[in-house]
Structures are given as C-alpha cells and as structure tokens.
C-alpha cells in the first residue's frame, strides 16, 4: 500500500540511502585485501556487487510503501533524443577532458576479470546510482522545492560530481556534473528511472570501450 510520508522523515530516508551507499564504499576500502582487489581488476566488481545487493532491495522495499520514485517506462523517441544529447555531450568533452588513469587501472588485463568489470560498470553501477541520485537524492531536494526542478537538478549534480573522489582532474568533475544534469532531465521528462538508467549505461559503455578494445584486441 502506497502512503504519503512526512516530508522531514522522507528527506531523512533519502539522505540515509546516500549514507548507506557511501558507507559501503568505506567498508570495501577498509578490506585487508583491498590492494590485491585493485591490482587484479576486481575492486569494481566487488564494490558494485555489494552496493547493488544492498541498494536494490532497499529501493524495492521503498516502492512497496511509496510511489514517488517510479521505475517508469522507456519510449523510443525519448531514448533517441537523450542518446543524441549524450553523444553531443561526449563530443564536447574532447575539447577539455584529460585522460584519467582510474578506469585503466581498475579494468586490469585479465579478460575474465574485464568481463566482470563490464558487468559492474555498465550494468550494475548505473542501476543503483540512478536509484540513489536521480531517485532518492533528487526527490529529497524536490520535497522542499517542488517548483525549482532546475535548482534541484543542479544540487543533485554537484553532489554526484563531488562524491566521485576517485578522479584526479577538475575537467572530469565538470563532465560528471553535466552528465548528471542530462540524467536529471531524463528522470524528470520521463517521470521514471528507466530512461536515466539507459542513458547512464550507454555513457559508461562508451567510456570503457577503449579499455575493452585494448584488452580483447591483444
């Protein structure tokens, strides 16, 4: 049964999801074999599997009680439109982006581990990150300013960029901020999470494609 929660309690619930997500990354970072996982290219598969296993059930529990963060539907026109917008965004990044070594290091050079990396980065991460950021976090801001969708999207995107601490360059954070704005737009226009999940998956697939080509072309 869907209910309408108190605004304060729902905001705390949304913030709590972010705390849980961040705590999981700290747990993995404190593992005694962290360096081994990173060196073998298994860090992202382990981290994403843990976060996926925790956040997806929490989201399913939430949707059984509340209806304000729906899964939504995919419509071909919206998919084409936002795919083109994503390609334009990626093309613009060639003017200012600097190469990050993080993805190369995480993928490793073992083809089997690389497939796990693909599953983690292209499939699992976009699902739970969209549930968290374009779902709970964006919703948390909109609870207090429902008419200020642009401002709420900007705040969500600033948080999304700032929390990706694994990157070295400011240009990457700018790119993440702009990507998040696009994903927020997809969420608001489609009234669901499926479209931003699709766009996020496409972005990540294109992002790791050079790494995958280098591994499997040997």
Image: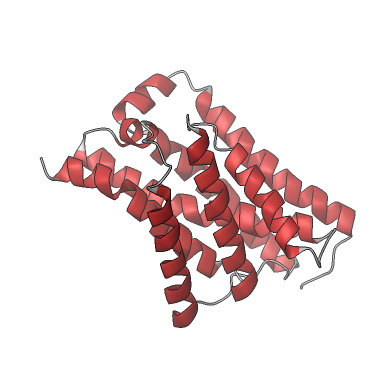
Which residue corresponds to the image point at 77% horizontal and 50% vertical from the top-left? 13
Q: Is 84 above or below relative to 18?
A: below
Q: Is 82 above or below relative to 127?
A: below
Quarter occupied by the N terminus: bottom right
In the displayed image of the protein, which residue is found farthest to the top? 32
Image-quadrant location for residue 116: top left
Which residue corresponds to the image point at 35% horizontal and 22% vertical from the top-left? 36
Which residue corresponds to the image point at 38% horizontal and 56% vertical from the top-left? 91
Left or right? Give the position of 64 relative to 104: right
Judging depth in this view, the residue of 94 and 73 nearest the camera is: 94
Residue 127 at what x, y percent from top left?
Answer: 51, 57
Task: Tell me, yes or no, if residue 57 can be seen here.
Answer: no
Image-quadrant location for residue 40: top left
Residue 183 at what x, y percent from top left?
Answer: 56, 60
Which residue corresponds to the image point at 19% horizontal and 41% vertical from the top-left? 214
In the displayed image of the protein, which residue is found farthest to the front? 95
Residue 172 at what x, y percent from top left?
Answer: 48, 40
């Amino acid at each position: 049964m869907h209910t309408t929660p108190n605004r304060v309690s729902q905001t705390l619930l949304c913030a709590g999801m972010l705390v849980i997500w961040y705590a999981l990354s700290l747990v993995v970072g404190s593992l005694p074999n962290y360096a081994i996982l990173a060196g073998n290219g298994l860090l992202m598969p382990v981290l994403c599997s843990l976060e996926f296993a925790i956040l997806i059930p929490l989201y399913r529990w939430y949707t059984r009680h509340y209806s304000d963060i729906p899964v939504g539907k995919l419509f071909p026109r919206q998919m084409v439109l936002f795919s083109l917008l994503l390609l334009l965004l990626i093309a613009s990044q060639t003017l200012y982006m600097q190469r990050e070594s993080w993805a190369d290091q995480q993928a490793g050079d073992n083809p089997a581990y690389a497939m796990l990396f693909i599953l983690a980065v292209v499939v699992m991460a976009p699902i739970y990150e969209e549930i968290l950021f374009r779902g709970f976090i964006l919703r948390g801001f909109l609870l207090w300013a429902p008419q200020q969708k642009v401002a709420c999207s900007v705040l969500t995107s600033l948080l999304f960029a700032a929390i990706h601490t694994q990157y070295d360059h400011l240009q990457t954070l700018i790119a993440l901020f702009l990507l998040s704005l696009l994903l927020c737009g997809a969420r608001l226009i489609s009234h669901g999470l499926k479209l931003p999940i699709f766009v996020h998956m496409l972005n990540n697939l294109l992002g790791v494609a050079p790494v995958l080509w280098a591994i499997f072309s040997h």
